[in-house]
């Protein structure tokens, strides 16, 4: 018979293993020596040790599911309980029990982790729903649309919740997206209608602008083009594919008109500049008639100059007051000379002037005599009063004498 600390082989070839409950039959060995029998079943024990070690490592270092781990533990426990190996089977049972505890702990950790992840996912999805519902009322169509698409991608990356909670949150999330899409669709439909109306308006404006491009009614047409431009701006933008073409036609029609007007105005400006030069020369000739020495000759010369003046035509507007003012100055001087000559040669006016001068002279002489008399009588106050009256009459007399001189008197 052969034995070791954990097993023995009796004389019949039966192999036993020692346990806390006594010896247990492992098996029968007839093929060789008892030592070979013990070595064989000890190798089976070592195999169990290796398998349990590998399972411990998998449980600790991999994501082996609890179910698969417990199945593997059950399989190993069956082998240990079957007593088909020689060794410390109790130690293997202890290791398997600890492994069960480890699997249970890992199961609880995973359950807690899943609960935490689920709670985080719930909060994350609730935040996504809240943001989506806020974006549903936004008018920032591009930015809000891009953000909603990003929220969908974020949602897809989050773990699912329980069916009821996940469905409720998804319904709110989807409803917010649908509401935004509906508002955006309505907005752009309205915008398309506005742009189509703008296109029709601008088509009409272009047609009118092109019709006016050959007009030579410069002032009225230029004013109408300004009105058309105001109407163009008020019409809003047409569709992108039409806006640029319409604008090019509208602007092109204006360019044709204003180029033609500019050409005509340039010719007119050149002509008026030449007219100004001629009128300045005539004004210079007119100014040489002053001062008037021969009124009749001066009037004849001015009339001739004025006829030439009227034949010349327009001058630039900003120069008109200055050059016309020079001619008016000469004309006024001639008129004043005529009035002076008329007064000088008018018999009735001369007689009135001589009569007034005589009356004033008699009054002055009378006052002088009264002053001398008052002084002789020693009446200084009366003399002073009369002297003041004399000053007034003398001033009138001097003025009348000056007027009389204009008549050659």
Image (spheres, grey):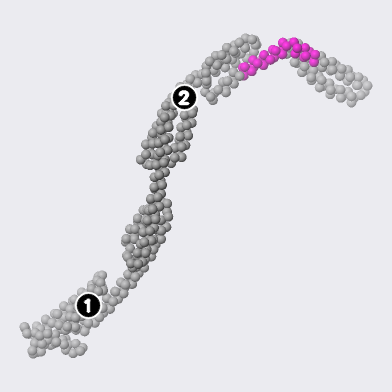
Instruction: Name the quarter where the N terminus is drawn.
Output: bottom left
- The magenta stretch is 329-357
Secondary element type, mark 1: helix
Identify the residue at horizontal 89%, vertical 19% (top origin): 370
- Please tell me how crowded label 1 is: few (under 14), some (14-19), or many (20+) other residues with Cα within 10 Å: many
Q: Is residue 404 above or below residue 26?
A: above
Would you identify the image quadrant in which residue 291 lies?
top right
Q: Could you tell which of marks 2 and 1 lies nearer the N-terminus?
A: 1
Question: Magenta part mainly helix, strand or loop?
Answer: helix
Q: Secondary structure at mark 2?
A: helix
Quadrant of the rendered structure where residue 337 is?
A: top right
In this picture, residue 57 sits left or right of residue 84: right
Q: What residue is disc 2 on?
A: 265
Residue at figure coordinates x 43%, y 35% from the top left: 205
Residue drawn at the location 39% of the way across and 54% of the way down: 180
Q: Which mark is residue 333?
A: none
Task: Judge by depth and name the residue closer to the eye, 141 or 35.
Answer: 141
In the image shown, does 400 or 66 lie closer to the viewer?
Answer: 66
Q: Which mark is residue 73?
A: 1
Above or below for 236 versus 304 = below
Residue 128 seen from this side: no
238 is within the stretch colored magenta: no
Circle count:
2
Q: Residue furthest right?
A: 377
The percent coordinates of residue 338 (x first, y second) are 67, 14
Residue 18 percent across, percent down from the top left: 17, 87
Q: Is residue 157 above or below residue 30?
A: above
């Amino acid at each position: 018979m052969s034995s070791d600390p954990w097993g023995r082989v009796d004389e019949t070839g039966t192999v036993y293993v020692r346990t806390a409950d006594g010896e247990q039959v492992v098996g029968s060995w007839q093929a060789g020596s008892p030592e070979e029998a013990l070595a064989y079943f000890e190798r089976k024990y070592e195999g169990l040790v290796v398998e349990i070690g590998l399972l411990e490592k998998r449980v600790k270092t991999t994501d082996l599911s609890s179910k698969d781990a417990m199945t593997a533990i059950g399989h190993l426990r069956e082998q240990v309980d079957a007593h088909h190996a020689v060794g410390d089977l109790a130690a293997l049972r202890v290791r398997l029990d600890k492994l069960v505890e480890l699997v249970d702990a890992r199961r609880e950790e995973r359950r807690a982790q899943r609960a935490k992840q689920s709670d985080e996912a719930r909060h994350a999805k609730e935040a996504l729903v809240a943001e989506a519902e806020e974006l549903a009322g936004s008018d920032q169509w591009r930015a809000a649309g891009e953000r909603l698409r990003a929220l969908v991608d974020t949602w897809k990356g989050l773990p699912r919740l329980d069916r009821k909670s996940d469905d409720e949150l998804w319904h709110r999330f989807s409803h917010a997206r649908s509401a935004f899409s509906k508002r955006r669709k309505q907005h752009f439909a309205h915008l398309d209608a506005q742009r189509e109306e703008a296109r029709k308006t601008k088509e009409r404006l272009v047609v009118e602008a092109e019709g006016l491009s050959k007009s030579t009614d410069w002032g009225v047409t230029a004013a109408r083009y300004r009105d058309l431009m105001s109407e163009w701006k008020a019409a809003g933008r047409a569709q992108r594919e039409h806006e640029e073409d319409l604008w090019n036609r509208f602007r092109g029609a204006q360019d044709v008109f204003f180029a033609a007007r500019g050409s005509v105005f340039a010719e007119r400006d050149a002509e008026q500049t030449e007219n100004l030069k001629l009128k300045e020369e005539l004004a210079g000739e007119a100014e040489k008639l002053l001062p008037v020495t021969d009124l009749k000759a001066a009037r004849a010369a001015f009339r001739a100059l004025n006829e030439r003046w009227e034949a010349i035509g327009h001058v630039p507007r900003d120069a008109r007051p200055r050059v016309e003012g020079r001619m008016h100055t000469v004309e006024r001087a001639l008129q004043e000379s005529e009035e002076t000559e008329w007064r000088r040669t008018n018999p009735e006016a001369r007689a009135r002037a001589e009569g007034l001068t005589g009356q004033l002279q008699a009054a002055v002489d009378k006052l002088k005599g009264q002053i001398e008399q008052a002084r002789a009588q020693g009446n200084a106050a009366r003399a002073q009063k009369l002297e003041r009256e004399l000053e007034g009459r003398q001033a009138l007399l001097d003025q009348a004498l000056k007027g009389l001189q204009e008549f050659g008197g």
